[in-house]
Image: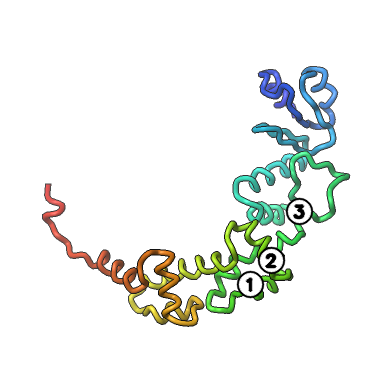
């Protein structure tokens, strides 16, 4: 919109592709012939510069920025609340594949991490998770790695061990009970996974916490 004029006048947009509100396209071209003005795209990214038209284009650009900074899951969640869709920069209305960005397979993963976290004691095999999002295991595994930068098994293990650490902080919880509650078939397999991930056994972690919490107060350590 009008702010494009100030940025263009500073020379920052020379030879860059931009867009603006349809009312200002011709005026912007006349005032700054060095710009490549695209009147069809709602918003455009060229290098580190973003430009957009009016109305909902600004919201669509904001969602794209959120997706860049926080990932597609966060952007999709906000888009659903606004009853908007995700669009890539430079996309044109007539070339948009219907529901390509908000209702495709990736959208099925939006609630999966929370579901896993609330079912840590259940069977969380790839087959189970793939069935949850209505995909075949092979395709699910490929999309999961792309989204979360970890295999499903590694992701589940991390959530289980994080929850195990939280539960181990409670004195009444034994290692065996924690192992069972977070989905391990045996205390031994839990110990091996915990030690591999945290370089300390669950019992050692629990004892270290107790030692820190119950360290005797020694005034001489704080003497001036």
**SS under mark 2:** helix
Q: Which residue is mark 2?
A: 140
Give the Cα distance between marks 3 and 1. Answer: 24 Å
Location of residue 92 by image quarter: top right
- How busy is the neighbourhood of tag 3: few (under 14 within 10 Å), some, or many (20 plus)? some
Instruction: Pinpoint residue 98: horizontal percent, then vertical percent.
Output: 84, 54
Q: Residue furthest right?
A: 94
**SS under mark 1:** helix
> Of the residues under marks 3 and 1, which one precedes in the sequence?
3
> Of the residues under marks 3 and 2, which one precedes in the sequence?
3
Instruction: Pinpoint residue 124: horizontal percent, then vertical percent.
Output: 59, 75
Q: Which residue is mark 3?
A: 101
Question: Toward the viewer: 52 or 139?
Answer: 139
> Of the residues under marks 2 and 1, which one precedes in the sequence?
1
Give the vertical position of 152 relative to 95 (above or below): below
Give the vertical position of 201 relative to 16 (above or below): below
Instruction: Pinpoint residue 75: horizontal percent, then vertical percent.
Output: 66, 52
Asked whether the beta carbons under mark 2 and mark 1 sit within 8 Å of each other, the answer is yes
| Residue 126 marker | 1
Location of residue 35 by image quarter: top right
Q: Which quadrant of the rendered structure holds the N terminus? A: top right
Instruction: Pinpoint residue 117: horizontal percent, then vertical percent.
Output: 55, 69
Give the vertical position of 168 relative to 34 (above or below): below
Residue drawn 37% across and 79% down?
A: 174
Q: Nearer the viewer, mark 3 or mark 1?
A: 1
Residue drawn 31% across and 70% down?
A: 204
Say left or right for 204 vs 10. Answer: left
Give the Cα distance between marks 3 and 2. Answer: 17 Å
Residue drawn 12% across and 50% down?
A: 223
Total numbered labels: 3
Location of residue 57 by image quarter: top right
């Amino acid at each position: 919109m009008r702010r494009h004029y100030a940025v263009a006048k500073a020379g920052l947009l020379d030879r860059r592709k931009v867009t603006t509100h349809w009312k200002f396209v011709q005026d912007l071209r006349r005032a700054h012939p060095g710009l490549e003005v695209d009147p069809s795209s709602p918003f455009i990214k060229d290098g580190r510069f973003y430009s957009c038209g009016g109305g909902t284009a600004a919201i669509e650009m904001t969602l794209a920025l959120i997706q860049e900074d926080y990932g597609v899951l966060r952007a999709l969640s906000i888009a659903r609340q606004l009853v908007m869709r995700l669009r890539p920069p430079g996309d044109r209305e007539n070339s948009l594949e219907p529901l390509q960005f908000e209702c495709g397979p990736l959208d099925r993963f939006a609630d999966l991490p929370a579901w896993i976290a609330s079912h840590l004691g259940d069977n969380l095999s790839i087959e189970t998770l793939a069935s949850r999002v209505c995909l075949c295991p092979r395709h699910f595994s490929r999309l999961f790695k792309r989204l979360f930068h970890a295999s499903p098994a590694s992701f589940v293990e991390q959530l289980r061990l994080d929850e195990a650490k939280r539960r181990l902080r409670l004195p009444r919880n034994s290692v065996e009970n924690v192992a069972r509650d977070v989905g391990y078939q045996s205390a031994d397999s839990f110990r091996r996974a915990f030690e591999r991930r945290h370089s300390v056994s669950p019992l050692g972690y629990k004892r270290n916490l107790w030692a820190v919490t119950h360290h005797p107060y020694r005034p001489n350590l704080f003497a001036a």
